[in-house]
Image (tube, rainbow, N blue to C red):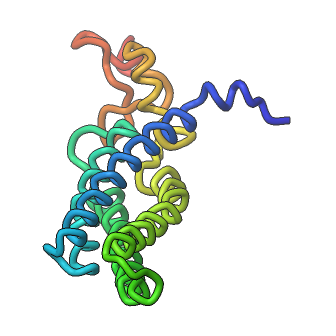
Amino acid sequence: MIDLRGFLRGTLPRIFTRYTLGSVAAAVVSEVTLLVAYGQKLLGAQAAAVAAWALGALTNYLLARWAWKRRGRPRVLRELLPFWATSVTGLLLTTWATGVAHDVGPRLFATDGARVLFVGAVFLGVYGVLFLAKFCFFHYFVFADPRAGSAGEADEDEEADPGEADGPGATDGPDGAAPRRSRSHVPSTTRK
């Protein structure tokens, strides 16, 4: 039987909440960029989608690192490349979908305002479809912590009690040694 209370107190709901907030912020940045660039005829539908994607992807990346509490230099192969590959896939899908919406819009709507809103809705719809798929990919691969039982677990534990950082799974280097509490802390294997 599933322990619902334990699950809700766990790290996954907190990460998902932060991810959702970050995704909503990135979606707002993207949507506003698209509607302004396309609605004001500064760019065509596909070029506006690219500009919207660029600003939204940067926002999404920074807020995704916040959602999984990642600090410091990102790992290129484990974090940067998979994240941006996912983002480029989103770019291709949104650019294609907004181009189709731009071509279909005049047949469906008589006014420019309705066409702009239609293109914006299609853009946002594709963004929404990718939301859950991206969360699963980010959580279980891109931001997964190989030292912890699930992604983000080690960071959440550190947030709760920084003094517990020398527990199981914590390492201070590639040799896997536990961090020392002080300079005089000597491993038990060297004591007599």
Q: Is residue 73 above or below residue 31?
A: above
- In this orientation, which residue lies closer to the viewer: 3 or 96? 96
- Residue that appears at 54% across and 57% down: 132
Give the tally of numbered discs.
0
- Residue that appears at 47% across and 22% down: 167
Q: Image quadrant of residue 121?
A: bottom left
Query: Hey, which residue is sitting farthest left in the picture?
Result: 42
Q: Position of residue 49 (x, y in %)?
A: 28, 72
122 to the left or right of 78: right
Q: Position of residue 123 (x, y in %)?
A: 40, 69
- In this orientation, which residue lies closer to the viewer: 187 or 6? 6
Q: Is residue 192 above or below residue 127?
A: above
- In this orientation, which residue lies closer to the viewer: 155 or 135? 135
Q: Image quadrant of residue 83?
A: bottom left
- Residue that appears at 40% across and 22% down: 159
Q: Position of residue 72 (x, y in %)?
A: 22, 40
- Considering the image in quadrants, where does the C terminus appear? top left
- Considering the image in quadrants, where does the N terminus appear? top right
- Residue that appears at 26% across and 50% down: 74
